[in-house]
Amino acid sequence: MRRQLAFITMALVAAQVLPAQEAVDSTRRNAIVTAIEKAAPAVVSVNVVQVRAQRELPPMFRDFWDFFYLPPSNYRLEKRRQDSVGSGFFVSKDGYLLTNFHVIEDADEVASVTLSDGRELPVTLVGADERTDLAVLKASQANVPSIPLGNSDDLLTGEWAIAIGNPFGPLMSDPQPTVSVGVVSANHRRVSPSVGGGERLYQGMIQTDAAINPGNSGGPLVNAKGEVIGVNTMIFSQSGGSVGLGFAIPINRARRVADEIIRFGRRRDPWAGFKVDDLTSLPEPLIVELGIHATSGCLVRNIMRDAPAYQAGLRPGDVVTAINGQRVETATDIDFAIWDLFVGDTITLEVDRKGDTLKFEFPVQELGR
C-alpha cells in the first residue's frame, strides 16, 4: 500500500512539474525573441576600403629611409580593407540598405557588406546626405532579407527598443549581429546643436537605454513587432562605451531621405530663400532703431525676391519667433527645421513685425533649381 501511495505521489508531482516546465518553455519565445528572429537576418556589417600612400624603397635602403628624400614617383598607393566599420540593414528585397553617413564618410570605397549568415555581397553607394547623417547602399544581389519599417511618430516612452548591429565587429570571429534590449527612454529629443558641429540634424531623436557601442552605428533600432523605428547613430559617454544614453534617427525621417536618394541619386537640398541673425547678437540701439518689439527670435536681414518666403509676405526686419510650431531662439533652430523638410513640404513661420504677430506659409523649394 505504501509503495502504491508513493507511486501515486510521484505521478502527481510529475504531472505538476510537466505543465510548469511547459509554461517556462513558452515564456522563452517571447515578443523580444520573435522580433530579433525577424529582424536580425537583414542586419549587415559594412566593409570599406581606404587608400593610403606608402613609401616604396629599394630593399637595401629600407633601414635608412628617414635619411633620404624621395620624390612622389617613389610612392605607391596601397588599398587597405577595413572590415566592419559599422552596421546597416536591408530595407527592401531588391538590395537597398540604409546606414549612417559617418560610417562611410572617410572611406575611399565601400567594398561590401557581410550578412549574418556569412555571405559577403559587393555593394555600391547610391547616395548620401551628410546633414541627416544617412546613406543608401545597393547590393549586387537581389532577394535579400529585409526588415519592415515601422512608424516613429507613435512611439511610447517605455516600450521595448532592441538595438541590433555589429559593435567591435573586427574583434569577433563570426558574422552574427549583437543584440541589446532596452526601452524608448524619450522621443523627439532635441540634441544640442554643438553635437555634430552644428552641421548634422541630430534633432527629433529617439533616446534609448539599449546598449549602443562603436560599430552599432547604422544598425536598426527595432520595436517588439520586429519593425525598424530608428537608425542607431550615437551615444553620450565619457568613457566611449555605452552608459545607457543612446540616440537613433527616427525611421520616418530616414525613410524619406532614403526614398529621395533612391529616386534622385541625392537628397535634394531644401531652400526657403532668407537669412537671419540671432536677436541676441544685435546691439540694443539697433533693436530700438528697427522698432523691434520681440524679445527672442531671429531677425530677417536678407531675403531673395524670387524666394517662396518673399512671395508669401516675409520681409527684411521681421523677427521669426517660431517655425512649424517650434520656438525659435537661434538661426540654427531655423536651419534644423528646414533641413528636416523635403522639397514641396510647407513651412509655417510665426513672425513679429514691430509688435504685430503675423503668420506666413509657403512651400520649400530645391536650392539652385
Image (tube, helix red, strand yellow):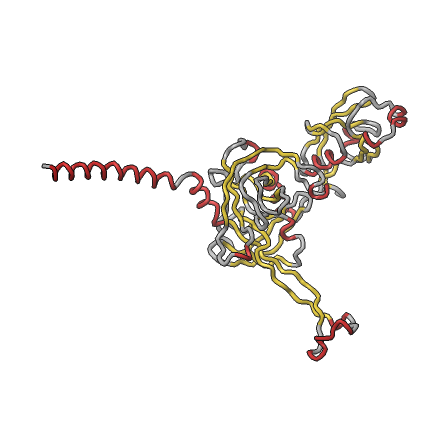
Looking at the picture, does residue 197 appear above or below residue 323?
below
Looking at the picture, does residue 341 appear above or below residue 146?
above
Residue drawn 61% across the image and 39% down it? 253
Of the 4 image quadrants, the one containing the N terminus is top left
Please name whichever residue, 185 or 104, is drawn nearer the observer in this view of the structure: 185
Of the 4 image quadrants, the one containing the C terminus is top right
Residue 11 found in image quarter = top left
Tell me, yes or no, if residue 163 can be seen here: yes
Looking at the picture, how far across and down is residue 43, in whole percent?
A: 52, 49
Looking at the picture, how far across and down is residue 182, in whole percent?
A: 51, 39
Along the horizontal axis of the image, is 289 left or right of 205?
right
* Residue that lies at the very extreme toward the top in this rendered image: 356
Residue drawn 16% across the image and 37% down it? 8
Residue 236 found in image quarter = top right
Please name whichever residue, 59 or 344, is drawn nearer the observer in this view of the structure: 59
Along the horizontal axis of the image, is 5 left or right of 178?
left
Looking at the picture, how far across and down is residue 343, in whole percent?
A: 68, 38
Looking at the picture, does residue 7 appear above or below residue 47?
above
* Residue that lies at the very extreme toward the front in this rendered image: 2
Tell me, yes or no, if residue 268 can be seen here: no
Looking at the picture, how far across and down is residue 333, in whole percent?
A: 72, 34
Please name whichever residue, 28 or 248, is drawn nearer the observer in this view of the structure: 28
